[in-house]
Image: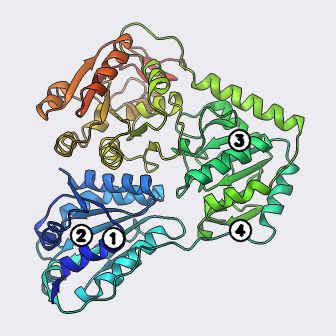
Amino acid sequence: MSRTGGQILVDALRHQGVDRVYCVPGESYLPVLDALYDVPEIALVSARHEGAAANMAEADGKLTGRPGICFVTRGPGATHASVGVHTAFQDSTPMILFIGQVPRGARDREGFQEVDFRAMFAPLAKWVAEIDQPGRIPEYVARAFRTALTGRPGPVVLSLPEDVLSEAVATAGQMAAPAMAPRATPGDGDVQTLSGLLKGASRPLVIVGGTGWSREGCAALADFAHRNRLPVVAGFRRQDLLDNRSENYCGHLTLGADPTLMERVKAADVILALGSRLGEITTSGYTLLAPPLPQQTLIHVHPDPDELGRVYQPRLAIASELSGFAQALSAVDIGWDERRTDWLRDARKAYVKYSTPASSAAGAVDLASAIGWLSEHVSEDAIVTNGAGNYTVWVHRYFRYRQPRTELAPVSGSMGYGVPAAIAAKLRYPDREVIAFAGDGCFLMYPQELGTAVQHGANLVVIVVNNGTYGTIRMHQERRFPGRVIATDIVNPDFVALARSFGAHAERVRSTDRFAPAYREARAARKPALLELLVDPQQLSPSFRVSRSGPTAPV
């Protein structure tokens, strides 16, 4: 019996264990949609915008550790979706983007919406390919999954000419079992050498990051840090790898990081980087560690050997899968040292002080107090998402993450990420509490996805921080060109009316004391909800305020 390319592709996805696909429907891959009609075990989530669909797939990849799947049409669909591919690349998230393409006979004629996807996605994906024969679809799909998962995880893009999807063939390549990435393990003596370097340190510091961590690996990391009295700090937007309530958790290397923490990184004598690429934000513009040879003794562990020595030359480079390596650290015991104990105590004390909100201010909603309350009252496994903007500085500073895979935040710094990511999280884990933070500018990237949430029953809570401006850019304007504000003010819609028009619960919160009851009511609404927080437009970050006379000193 013959089968179309679309049917073969859906069958290949089933063999890889795919149970959810995100898309914006398009004519160029209509045979795939038709094939999915007969496969109820694969849920189809139809978004309103390809960028949002790609962000949903990326978030699903973060949550599950398996490639998130997204389908879009060619041309504008693919260019919209590229934002999610870029996030998957910078965030090291497994993801596969399938793009409907012009028929084979129309290629290289600039057909309708034609784009050379190999050229377009070459710097954004681990592998880009176009499938020319329906019989080879299983081969390409199996390779795509394996590539997305191997080494440093990331995105793969497969282009699908529409006539390949509609062509029927009698036989196709053999379906592959779910792809399993090969796991690198430490070499003989690596753990012993690491132990010796840490044992000789008086000011050691662990920087943890990367993806692919299992709960067992995170538990092994926590045990290793606790037994050896080691301070652990999170790389940019990797705060959920260690319970922030742990005595070993000492902060987050992020935008607006605690200045004392940054000085602590500079003062460390040995740094163990577990999974982190030690990128620009984590290293504060490559200043906390100076490339190529940092003054600190650097031990760098990463699953992809190509990342080791790429920017920094470590004293000890170990190519290893992260969770397995963390479990191998059970053999490390560097003994008690009073200097290390004092070093940890001071680091933890500084973190607690920095992350504890001050007393609430009168007037507009005090964002620090609201997030501090939320941190204390959400469930242990609540998932918190955000996009990009200065509002995230409050989230990362005052919310304390408790469990792995509860933070969905773009290392790429992509605006608009939070709401699509939260929809994916709520659909993946419908019984868990899911909160999406967004600035007013960030939310307006994909406000239409409230319709997707209502349609699919994703009962998340969206918290829109409304200060009427692009806060990050305004802050930089005030620092570099004080008083010369241009292009950063925003004319906003009525967010409450907009949310209600989709059928969501919504409320405008004008004061700090109203936040807690408003949040409880939003949770009790049993449908998607939006809370608009009116905040002080002059307070651009927790430590940067402007007035009519210009910027003030940090507060």
Q: Residue at x 76, y 30 (%)?
A: 345
Q: Nearer the viewer, mark 3 or mark 1?
A: 1
**Whole-number angstrom distance, CA of label 1 to CA of label 4:** 31 Å
Provide the residue designation for mark 1: 157
Q: Is residue 116 visible?
A: no
Q: Quadrant of residue 527?
A: top left
- In primary-sequence order, the first of circles 2 and 4 is 2
Q: Residue at x 44, y 34 (%)?
A: 392
Q: Nearer the viewer, mark 2 or mark 3?
A: 2
- In primary-sequence order, the first of circles 2 and 3 is 2
- In primary-sequence order, the first of circles 1 and 4 is 1
Q: Is residue 148 visible?
A: yes
Q: Is residue 475 left or right of residue 340?
A: left
Query: Mark 4 is on which residue type?
Result: Pro
Query: Mark 2 is on which residue type?
Result: Ile
Q: Does the residue at mark 2 contact the one at mark 1 (Cβ under 8 Å)?
A: yes
- In primary-sequence order, the first of circles 2 and 1 is 2
Give the image location of residue 134, x and y in percent: 23, 86
Query: Mark 1 is on which residue type?
Result: Val
Provide the residue designation for mark 2: 99
Provide the residue designation for mark 3: 265
- In primary-sequence order, the first of circles 4 and 3 is 4
Q: Residues within 10 Å of mark 1 (few under 14, many from 20)?
A: many
Disc marking residue 267: none
Label 1: element kind: strand
Query: Mark 3 is on which residue type?
Result: Val
Q: Nearer the viewer, mark 1 or mark 4?
A: 4
**Whole-number angstrom distance, CA of label 2 to CA of label 3:** 44 Å
Q: Residues within 10 Å of mark 3 (few under 14, many from 20)?
A: many
Q: Is residue 241 left or right of residue 407?
A: right
Provide the residue designation for mark 4: 186
